[in-house]
Amino acid sequence: MGGIARYLEEAALVTRAMDPVIIRQVSDVLLAALREGRQVFLFGNGGSAATASHFAVDLGKGLQAHDGRRLKALALTDAVPVMTAWANDTDYSRIFSEQLANFACPGDVAIAISGSGNSPNVLKGVRTAIEKGALTIAFTGDMEGKLKEMVDLCVVVPSSNMQHIEDCHMIVAHVIYTDLRERLAAGARAASVGRPAAFGPGAAVPPPDSPPVS
């Protein structure tokens, strides 16, 4: 049991070392995207691709404002025929950037997930997002990657262990989803009694009414 207990303790230490301020800033950006009808694109490779898909489901299915607005969240990793077409006909590094060239608009949000911060297709996707005028966010690890220097906001897991990095990325995704759900629930309750919805950063929120998605 030594290795199991050690892994769990290390994972807990890394999680507790995460910066809650930058995580809240990402939540603020996504709340503004919902309010303004912006699109959110998520992408990554391997385990990060799975995180992108999972996070997109939480954001797109689990969040709804009191007036019916929803977050337009799409995982580029789910477009398998498109990705394989670009990889087969051109180069694997273009599988995300070419999708963003089609769909990203000024003011949209691109969330790039890469433990190393050096995946060529992720870096190229971020460059295209910037060219299209999107706000860029990264989830990465402490591995001296190029990604964190390119984006507007970067959530850095303070570890070089890829498993702990991927663990924390999924935890951060759930933290952000939970924060957004609570803030939207507070806004719905405020609207029901005729008060302005408290959507802004730092708004006090009671426990949510709606159940989480699986």
Image (cartoon, helix red, strand yellow):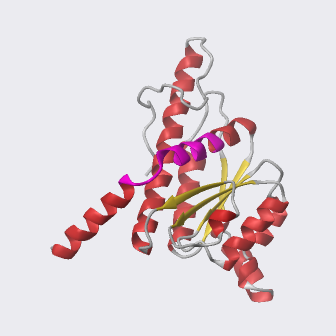
Dominant SS in magenta: helix
Q: Position of residue 82 (x, y in %)?
A: 74, 74
Query: Is the residue 9 above or below the residue 116 in the image?
Result: above
Q: Residue at x 55, y 32 (%)?
A: 184
Does the magenta-highlighted stretch encompass residue 21? Answer: yes
- Residue numbers of the magenta segment: 16-29
Quadrant of the image containing the N terminus: bottom left
Q: Position of residue 10 (x, y in %)?
A: 30, 65
Q: Residue at x 46, y 50 (%)?
A: 174
Q: Position of residue 15 (x, y in %)?
A: 38, 56
Residue 111 lies left or right of residue 140; in this view the side is right
Query: Is the residue 109 above or below the residue 10 in the image?
Result: above
Q: Residue at x 32, y 59 (%)?
A: 13
Q: Position of residue 159 (x, y in %)?
A: 43, 67
Q: Quadrant of residue 148?
A: bottom right
Residue 32 lies left or right of residue 193; in this view the side is right
Q: Quadrant of residue 24?
A: top right
Residue placed most toward the observer, 204 or 49: 204
Q: Residue at x 76, y 86 (%)?
A: 91
